[in-house]
Amino acid sequence: MNAPTDLPRLWRPAELTGRHAERQALDRLLGAVRGGESRVLVMHGSPGMGKTVLLEYLIGRSQGCRVARATGVESEMELPFSGLHQLCGPMLPLVDGLPEPQRDALRITFGMSAGPAPDRFLVALAVLGLLSQAAERQPLVCVVDDHQWLDRASARVLAFVGRRLGTESVALVFGTRIRDSDLTGLPELAVRELPDGDARALLERTLDRPIDAHVRDQLVAEAHGNPLALLELARGLVARRLAGGFGLPGALPQWRCIEENFYQQITALPLDSQLLLLVAAADPSGDTALVRRAAVLLGIPSSAAACASDAELVDFGLRTRFRHPLIRSTLYRTAPPELRRRVHRALAESTDSPRDPDRHAWHRAQAAAEPDDDVAAELETSAGRARARGGLSAAAAFLRRAAELTTDAVQRADRLLAAADAEVQAGLLDTAADLLDTAGAGPLNDRQKAHSDLIRARLAFATSRGSDAPPLLLAAARRLQRVDPALSRATYLDALSAAGFAGRTAPVGASMADVARAAAQAPPPPHEPQVSDLLLDGTAAAYAVGYAVGLPTLRKALAAFDSGMPAEEELSLLWMATTTAMRLWEDDHWEALSARHLRLARESGALSELPLALTSRIYLLLFSGDLAQAARLDDELQAIVSATGSGMVAYSALGVAAFRGDQATFAPLLTTARADAVRRGEGNGITFAQWANALLHNSLGNYREALLAAQDAAAYRQDPGTLIWPAVELVEAAVRIGEPEAATEVYQQFAEVAQASATPAALGLCARSDALLTAGPEAEQHYRAAIGHLEHTRLRLDFARAHLVFGEWLRRERRRNEARAHLRTAHDMFVAMGTLAFAHRAELELKAAGGLSSSPSLPAAHTDLTAQEAQIARLARDGLSNPEIATRLFLSPRTVQYHLRKVFAKLGITSRSQLDRAIPDVT
C-alpha cells in the first residue's frame, strides 16, 4: 500500500505535542531511506507513552513510499507467522523472484505450498529478499507495532532481518513495551515521559472546553508524564468538573486509572455495542467481515457499530482497530467467562474452516468450558500444520491447549510431551522445562517416561553442549530399549556425540567409554544395518573395546555414504560421519564428507546445520594448506553467527589464527574459547583450544609454551582418534626443549592408534614423531618415511612440516646442502599456504644453512577495502553471482551490488573479470 494522504481517525496531530526529538529522529530515518539506505529503529516505552502515535506520524510522513505494517496482538501469539503474514502478505506476488530455496521456504511458511518445514533462518533470508525486491521501485517503510505481542516465529524472523538490512531503501521500525533479547543491539529510541510543560500544552490542545488551572495541574501530576493517562483522565471528567475542580480522581495507580477510564467509556455504551466490542476484542485477526458475521449470529444489530465508533474506541474499517491495545485487553479481561466463550463460539462458527482451519480450532478451544476431545484433536492437527510450516512455538501452544482439553490421561501426557519437544526445537527452553514438569506431575507409562527423559536430555544438550547432556541421553536410551528399540539406538548415537563434546568434563558414569559400553548392549537393528547402525556399533566398539576393533565397522559406515540415502537422513548423520573420518585419519573421506555436508546444508537451506558443516570444512582446508579458502568460509561462518545471534564460539577463527601464526588475533580468541568451554562444561572445547595453542607456539618456536599447552590438550586420553592432534605438538615441543620423556606416555598411545589406523596420514604423522624422538642416524629413515607417507595425503601443512623438521635435523648433522633443499621446499610451501610463523621459522633455518628463500613475499592485502567489501569481492572473484553471495552472507542482492560498486571504484576496475587480477588469492 502507498502512504495515506490523511491521518487515521483515531489519533490527532495534537497528540504529538512535545515529541520534537522523536519526530526529528523519524524524519531523519525517512530521509535516509529515500536516499537509498536502510534504517532500523526500536521505539520502546511504557504503554501510553505515544509509540503508536509516533508510528502513525511516520506513516503519515511516508509520501512516495510503500508502507507495510503489522501489529502484535496478545491473543494471537500462538498463531505461527501471523505477524509476518500481516507485514508481507501484500508483497507475496513478488515471491517468485526469490532464489528457489528461499521461494519454497516462504511458500511453505505461508501455507501456499506443501513441503518439509523450512529452516527458520532460511525463512528470514527469504523475507529479507522479499523486502529488498519490494523496495526496488519505491522506498519501503515497515512498521511493526506492539512487537512484544508478535508470535515468536515472526519476532525472530524480523529481528534477523533488522540485523541484515544494508542498502535496500527499507525502514523497519518497531514499537514495543519491552526490549527483549531478539532486539538487543538494534538502534533504539526511548519514548519517555512528557515534561510538565508539554503535558499542559497537550491538554489545552486536545480538550474542546476550558479547563481550570488547578484541575489541569492536578491531572498533569496524576498522569506522571504519560500522554494516554493524561488524556484518559481528562476524558473521564465531565465539563463542570473540568471547569470547577470538583471530583478529581483519587490517588489511584496509573494503570488502574487508565483501565478504569476505558472501562467507564465501554460500560457507558448500549449493551449491544459492548457485546460487539467484545467480539472485536476476541478476534485478533482484525477481520471486520468476520466480526460482522459473528455479530449476526449473536443477534447484534448493525447499528451497534455506530455507537462504538462514535465513542472513538474502535474503527471498523477494512480492518478493525482499537484506539489503544489497553481497550482490547480491558474489554476481554472484564467480560464474564461465559460471555467470552459465547463470543468465541460465534467466531468459530463464522470462520471459514477449510480456508483458515487453525483460527477455527483456536476459537473452538477458547469457547470450550471443559475438556473436549474433538476440539483437542483439531488443535493437535493444527499443531501438525504449524510444525510443517516451521512454527514450532505455535505447535507447542496448540498442543499445550489440546492437552488441557484432553480427557484421557495417557493422551494428555503425550500431548504435553509433544509440546515440550516442540519448545526445545524452537529454542524456548524455560517453557519446555515447565511442560515436562507438568507432564511428570501425572502418571506416565514406560514409553512416556522414556520420551520425557529423552526430551530432558535434548533440552540439556540445547542449553549447552556440555556435561549435563550425556547422562540424561544415556538414561533415556536405556529406558527406550524396552519400549522403542529403534529410537533407543538413535538416542545412544546422540549420547555418544554428546559425550564427545563433553570430553574431560563428562560426569562419572557418562564418559565416552561409559556411554560406549552401554551402547554396545543396545538392541540390534531389526533390519539390515543402515549407516546410522554402523556408526553406532563401530563407535561403541572403538571406545568400549578398542580403537582397532571399531575400525572395520566405521570404515564400512563411511563407505556407505557413497551408496546414496535420503538427503534429510544424510544431513542428520554427516556431522558424526565427518568427525569419524577425522578420528580415523581417513583424509579422503574427510574431504568428501565435509564437502557434501556443506553442500547439502546450503542446498536444503538448513542454516542451523551450517555452522557445524562450515567448521568441519574449515579444518579440512586448514590441514590441506588452503588457508585462503578456510578464511573465506570462516567469514561466512561469522556472518551466520552475527545474523542468528547464536553466540557460538569462534573455534574456526581460532584455528585460522593458529595456522597463520597470528598471535595477536589468536590470544583474545583463546581466552574467549576457553572461558566459554569451561562455562558450558564442554571439555572437547578445552582440548581443542589448547591443541591450537600448542600448534601456534610450535610455529613461533615458543616450545616451552607449546609443551604446556600440548600437555593440557593431551591430558584427556579417552578419545584416541583426536589424541593424534595434541600428541604431535607435544612430541615436537618436548624434543625441542630437551625433555623427550615428557611425551613418552602420550606418544606410545598415539603410536598404537596410528598403527591401527594405518592410513598414510596417521603413519606419516607417527613417523615424523618417531624421527624427532630418535637419536642418531636412525632418525633419517623415519624422516624419509614421514615425507613419503604425507606426500600422498591431503595434509599439505604436515607434509611441509615434515620437510622442515628433516631440514633442521640435516643442518644439525652438518649436511647443509641437503638441509637447504628440504628447508626451501618447506619455506616455499608455507609461504604459498599463508602459514606465516612456520614460514619465518623455515626462513631462519634456511639462512642458518647458508641458503636464501626463493619465494616472493605474500601479496599485500587491500587494506583500503572494508572487511565486508573484501569478503564480497573474493566471492565475486570466485564466480558467485550476487544472489549467491547474498545467500552466503545473509544480505540482500541489492546490498551486495552496492558494495561491489564501491569495490570497483576503490580498485580502479570496471568488471568482475578484473577481480582475479586485482585481488589475488591470499589469506
Image (cartoon, rainbow, N blue to C red):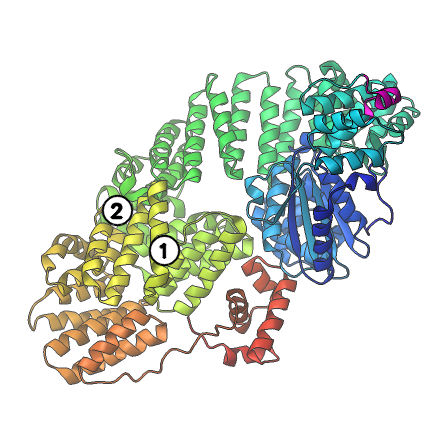
Work out whether 523 lies above or below 591: above
Residue under label 2? 542
Residue at image point 20% right, 54% down: 708
Task: Assess disc 1: are there few (<14), some (14-19) or many (≥20) residues with their C-alpha within 10 Å of its C-alpha.
Answer: few
Amino acid under label 2?
Answer: Ala
Amino acid under label 1?
Answer: Pro
Task: Assess disc 2: are there few (<14), some (14-19) or many (≥20) residues with their C-alpha within 10 Å of its C-alpha.
Answer: many
Q: Residue 111: in sight, yes or no?
A: no
Answer left or right for 48 relative to 571.
right
Residue 173 lies, in percent from the top left, at 68, 47
Q: CA distance from mark 2 to mark 1?
A: 36 Å
Residue at image point 23% right, 45% down: 718
Residue 920 lies, in percent from the top left, at 46, 77
* Nearer to me, 218 or 155: 218
Tell which circle, 2 or 1, labels the residue nearer the N-terminal end: 2
Residue under label 1? 668
Inspect the magenta stretch and tell me whether residue 238 lies in it. yes
Which segment did they paint magenta? 235-246
Quadrant position of residue 855: bottom left
* Nearer to me, 906 or 730: 906
* Nearer to me, 84 or 239: 239
Dot 2 lies on which element? helix
